[in-house]
Amino acid sequence: MAMQYQFVPPNEGDFSEDYDVITNEEIEEIKDALEEGRMDKAVAKIMENLQSLEDTCLNIAVTGESGSGKSSFVNAIRGLGDQEDTSAPTGVVETTEKPTPYPHPKYPNVTLWDLPGIGTPTFRPSTYLRQVHFSRYDFFILIASERFKASHVQLAKAISQVGKKFYFVRSKVDADLEASRKRRPQTYNEEAILGQMRENCQKCLRDENMPDSEVFLVCNWELNKYDFVMLQETLDKELPSHKRHAFLLALPNMSLDILQKKKMALRAEIWKVAMVSAGAAAVPIPGLGVACDVALLIKNLSKYLKSFGLDRDSLVRLAKKANKPVEEITEVIQSPLAKEISKDLVLKLLTKAGGGALMFMEYFVSPIPVLGSVAAGGISFATTFYMLKSCLDEVANDAQQVFLKAFESEL
């Protein structure tokens, strides 16, 4: 007798609709396959969807005048400083002679391209776009460190004409704020000065016949301040779902809000991973009464650590930025995943999850009065789901505690 499953997509607040990365059409195909008893077909479709998430490429072009901070911006988005081995070179003179790709150190499918500077006497927008191969980029970041000039606007209009998105970023905000603080210490008002900067940038754009463009004020050394969150939210709205997902996971963990968004994005994948793990080719685990793909679970648990910056390299980099011993910021980590992710640990976690999994059975898999092997499929799914959800919650909480510990003096 074929196994009969009823597929119920998770909802009711358990996942974030903002990071829905599977289409209604795909959900219907999976549902139809399960109702036909074709678990293998449903699993294949879900595997295809998961793989497409991993394979989605995001190419971000960063350009501006020489000395505007575009190379530092490339490094900041990649979670790096300016003096690391894989950082984009920076300097007061133009250091970029041709489009140079800088893959994200953790997510090589996300690449930031440092483009040659604009604003020289020989600069021509249409020629420039051909030279930098505009078609390979998903969107452009146009950076200015003081004000936006005719060259920025000319390039923006040319980008728009070829059907690409662009975003104006005003860099080095921190330097201007500090200079203002020193000049007028008694009347210094950060909010007012930021407003003046934004208005000045928009006036420059209005003067160049580009009145409705938004300007994002950014400090490359502290992305959590000023307008970077607004830029991220804008990209959330305008990027396709798979590329939005890739951009979010690649962002440095610069705020508690970003950590929460990553948690919701990864939580939206759990039912897919659990379905694949408990699929037709899953291996029964003696003594547990479940069948799952242990290698797949190890891969996803490792992904959680990487996404939340709890791998060793990320923790060392964070400790350096916070000017604290790495042992101090890691003392708050509770999850056993931070010490090792092995087959033995996965089996222990599945055993621990067995009891809690029962509460998910009725929600995900309808009661089916057939042989125990059918029920075991539902148990395997629910156990795997509960284990992954519990681990994600633990790792996300640890990441929040590490962030708070690292920057407790600044919060």
Image (spheres, rainbow, N blue to C red):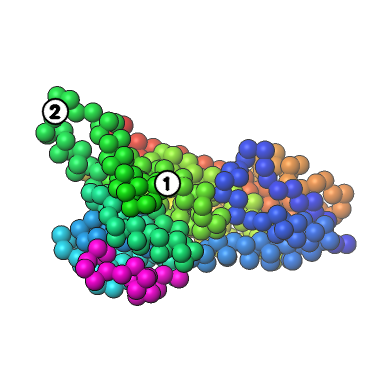
Q: Disc 2 vs disc 1: which is toward the camera?
A: 1
> Magenta stretch?
117-135
At label 1, counting other C-alpha atoms closer than 10 Å, the crowd grade (few under 14, some 14-19, many 20 or more) is few
Image point (41%, 57%), residue name: 166
Q: Position of residue 178 (x, y in %)?
A: 17, 38
Residue under label 2, please give it. 185
Left or right of 262: which side holds 272?
Answer: right
Residue in the picture at 84% in, 61% down: 36
Relative to 336, 387 lies left or right: right
Viewer-nearest residue: 254 or 372: 254
Say which of 141 and 73 sits in front: 141
Amino acid at the residue labelled 2 = Pro
| Disc 1 element | loop
In the rendering, at what x and y percent does residue 99 appear? 32, 71
Which residue is tagged 1?
212
Locate residue 25 relative to residue 158 in the image: left or right: right
Whole-Å distance between the Cαs marked 2 and 1?
34 Å
- Image coords of residue 197 (percent x, y): 27, 40
Q: Amino acid at mark 1?
A: Asp
User: How many other residues sit within 10 Å of disc 2, few (<14), some (14-19) or many (≥20)?
Assistant: few
